[in-house]
Amino acid sequence: MGKEILSSKILVGIGLISYPLYLWHWPILSYLRIVFGSLPPSGIRIAALIFVFIASYCTYVFIEKPLRFSENRKRVTKYLLGSMLIVFALGISFYKANINISNYEVNIDKLGSMVSDAGEGEATKLKENTQILQVNVAEEGKYHHDLTKFSSDTASVDDLLWPAIENSEEGCKQLHPYTYYCKGAVNGNPSAALFGDSQANHFYRGLAAQLGKSGTSLINLGLSGCPPILGITSHYPNQADWCKSGGNLKILNFISSEPSIKTVYLAANWNLYILGRRFGSSDQYQPNWEIRFPSRPEVDTNSEVFRIGIKETIEILRRSNKKIVFIKQIPEINYSPKDCIMSRSLSIRLTERDCIVPRGDVSDYLNAQDVIINNILRDYPEIKLLNPVDFLCDDLLCYGFYKGSPLYRDALHLSKFGSNFIGAKLIKTY
């Protein structure tokens, strides 16, 4: 039975093209992952698989068989050696070109579209900046706009690591078991609290270090995928509710009733909860993220749930005489920082032009957050508003690296270096 199955024409055919299959599948799938920035859609993967089989069959028929069964062995040997030398020479030339020029190109096409969309005064400024950013490719090595401080050349994939200890500490979890994120002030009473989701958590490292210099002890309490709002569900439709534990109520009760806590920092992935979408193509095949009040079905939009819910949180904190600091979310990026880092001397990676995002694209995406949060906070002039976008972007571009170190560990979260960098900037402006 087994012999009959293994000797079938289909399996024998796959066996004959198995080596070309091995050679073709890896570069094709790797290239698609680079293009999409994550796992490609199933339709694209199926099409790629069909292409790999066709290419493997052609390779076997038109290259492998003629070479393997040719009677002129000397001619085949010369052909193979010559082909290897050509491929080697092309690889070295592309590698050198990537280092000397491509790594420092700016995506002028994107800047050009920004110019065409801008008003007259702004367009003049953008045109001037675009001219500064031009790369004279004919004169190798010349670059008129210094992006070297935003280069990833000296970064390591180890810089992207985010160990579990960055999320919670055992002593803190014992005191607050209803949390997912729990760090700080285990051996004493905290004088400030950071309340939110994973976006709040990635600020903790840097904020705690800076506040500690002035004697302020910070505690971080929060839930993943759940904004600091009471009584809501938070999830993609028909998926698990990230707020189902009810931990936010216990967190807010602790913060509001703890007399040692004078200041509360609120931070989260605000735009996801307000708009229901992430930046770029990160969740293009997902339905919109929803936040809802189960007890108030008449409130049926994310923006209205957010407006009502965050004001209720603010009012509870105000009644407890807490000073409130509201931190907007960081710019989300549309690439993986890991793909910008050269982990091996000849590895394929994104160039610097691919590891930046136009400021205009970021502003367009974050507009929903800015409009609603700014309108809410007009009623609370005493609340301090901090915006990390100002420290991760200039007038034209938003960056993922600074002086050779990654600011992000993934497309949505700061790295340890990024947290320290932003923490210092935020507290300096506070």
Image (cartoon, grey):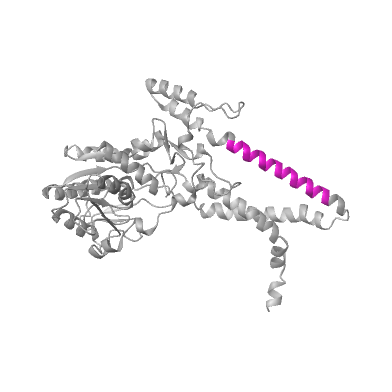
Tell me where residue 163 appears, x and y as whole percent. Answer: 39, 57
- Residue 105 position, x and y percent, is 53, 33
Membership of 219 in magenta stretch = no
- Pinpoint residue 129: horizontal percent, then vertical percent: 45, 25
| Predominant SS of the magenta segment | helix
| Residue under the image location 47 percent in, 52 percent down | 158
Q: Residue furthest bottom?
A: 1
Residue found 71% across the figure and 56% down from its top: 57
Q: Quadrant of the C terminus?
A: top left
- Does residue 237 appear in this view? no
Q: Is residue 64 left or right of residue 423?
A: right
Relative to 114, say whether 226 is above or below: below
**In the foreground, 59 or 96:** 96
Q: Is residue 45 above or below residue 94?
A: below
Q: From which residue to which does the magenta span run?
A: 77-99
217 left or right of 206 in image: left
